[in-house]
Image: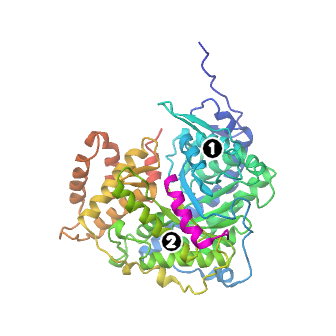
Amino acid sequence: MAAPPMTPTLDLPEGVLVTGELRPGYEQILSRTALELVASLHRALEPARRERLAARARVVQAVAEGTDLHLLPETRHVRDDPDWRVAPPAPGLVDRRVEMTGPTDRRMTINAMNSGARVWLADQEDANTPLWANVVEGQINLRDAVAGTISFTSPTGKEYALESTDQQRNPTIVMRPRGWHLEEKHVLVDGEPVAGGLVDLALYLCASARLQLDAGKGPYLYLPKLEHHLEARLWNDAFLLAQDALDLPRGTIRATCLIETYPAAFQMEEILYELREHAAGLNAGRWDYLFSVIKTYRTRGTEYILPDRNSVTMTAPFMRAYTELLVRTCHRRGAHAIGGMSAFIPSRDEDANAIAYAGVTADKRREADDGFDGSWVAHPGMVETCREVFDAVLGDSPHQLHRTREDVRVGPAELLDVAATPGRATRAGLRSDIDVAVQYLAAWLTGKGAVAIHHLMEDAATAEISRSQVWQWVHHGVVLDTGEQVTPELVRTLTDEVLTGLPGGPDAHRQAVDLFLELALGEYVDFLTVRASASLP
């Protein structure tokens, strides 16, 4: 009988403590070089990170007191200067017409690399529960994917392997680290937990940056949840420190920023400016954007109350303003504009499939016609549909940077025009919010950050919208189409109804239900992932 694998040991730098379980292979990711980089980044940037998080709270308080989001007068010179540009597109990021998103577990990594997409967003954030094993093993999987050595055998014996080890043919990997608000409780520096995003950055660079460069590409990132251009500057500072520490040429790292918060929509140019030598573009993170609209204006008047979540489409005036401004901003500065995710996934239901493919086609056609250079899908089965739409518009051109969209005239008034959104609050919409939030939280707590629910691939953003909308409707006593007022009692009644139809019944979802009710009916919490992480080992 073979001896069990030895538990690895780590060569820890002074002041660094790793409390997570160590499994064979972890020591290759948690190398001394990586942990030294984690420590140096934390010591240099933690005070500024804390200040930026405090500044977020001040913005929400100002909005609650009646001050609307606005363009910053102190950065007008950045917006008015016509001459600055971001760096030219990096190798592997020139043509981004179809991007696939997904978690970094081993099977999904292989499926993504075989998907035929131009880019794979390897998600260590909203599609990933931050269990310690997911944090470290996700980096192992990314390293092995870049090296061309990744394979996987399922418990049923099904084998997964790369169809090609030629990294020029495979999707370009763009890793999404955690946002500034999330901490990694299993890594302490001088007794303090480290920002999860800095842990993700350091581990990824040390394990995969050289491999990416050898493959003719580079270490690329998607930056989530930015709310201010100074948060982008904080990332830029991290990139400069990391590149110096690892002897990587300045500008090696490239980052696409998700414009997925309401405050960031008013600072798109400033965000690109702060990252300009590392900037690759902006992405319309539509679902988190809806969440942020609700969160930021949750206590204001009825003009900021959205109708049913599923009725708010990309043609709503405030959403259309946001996406058109994003394209104009990006192309004015030489950056790619990447469209939002279509969550539709194929199923065995032919009628549902017809709806899904028609929905993806219409969504991507609108984006391509508006000037976007590419867009997201959530399933390999949707890659070809997205590609066909963008092929029809792009042809042989790799992007649409020449379309500067000077016809777009969007200012604060258009971005803030939530009141013009068609639709209303319904009992069915409230029940749907509860259903999706409970199902997603139940899966998230077991370690699954991307979950198929009702023929859609959901991540944390959907649960955030759902629980925030319920909170807002309760806070304002919204009256539904049935004439009922949204109260805590009605929410609990509908939650009980939802539970009766879920596999396993109430007992299988009790922890998720308790968490949902706390988030939807208690004191508002900025991010459910922060609160839910407290329940993880």
Q: Which residue corresponds to the image point at 65% horizontal and 32% vertical from the top-left?
A: 25
- Under mark 1, the amino acid is Glu
Crowding around mark 1 (Cα neighbors within 10 Å: few <14, some 14 to 19, many 20+) is few
Relative image position of residue 36 (x, y in whole percent): 73, 44
Q: Which residues are magenta?
A: 380-398
- Under mark 2, the amino acid is Arg
Q: Which residue is mark 2?
A: 365
| Quarter of the rendering occupied by the N terminus | top right
Relative image position of residue 192 (x, y in whole percent): 60, 46
**Above or below, 133 relative to 174:** above
Q: Which residue corresponds to the image point at 54% horizontal and 56% vertical from the top-left?
A: 181
**Above or below, 470 relative to 28:** below
Extreme residue toward the left, this view:
483
Relative image position of residue 23 (x, y in whole percent): 60, 30
Q: Return the residue nearer the eye: 338 or 70.
A: 338
Q: Which residue is mark 1?
A: 163
Relative image position of residue 231 (x, y in whole percent): 62, 65
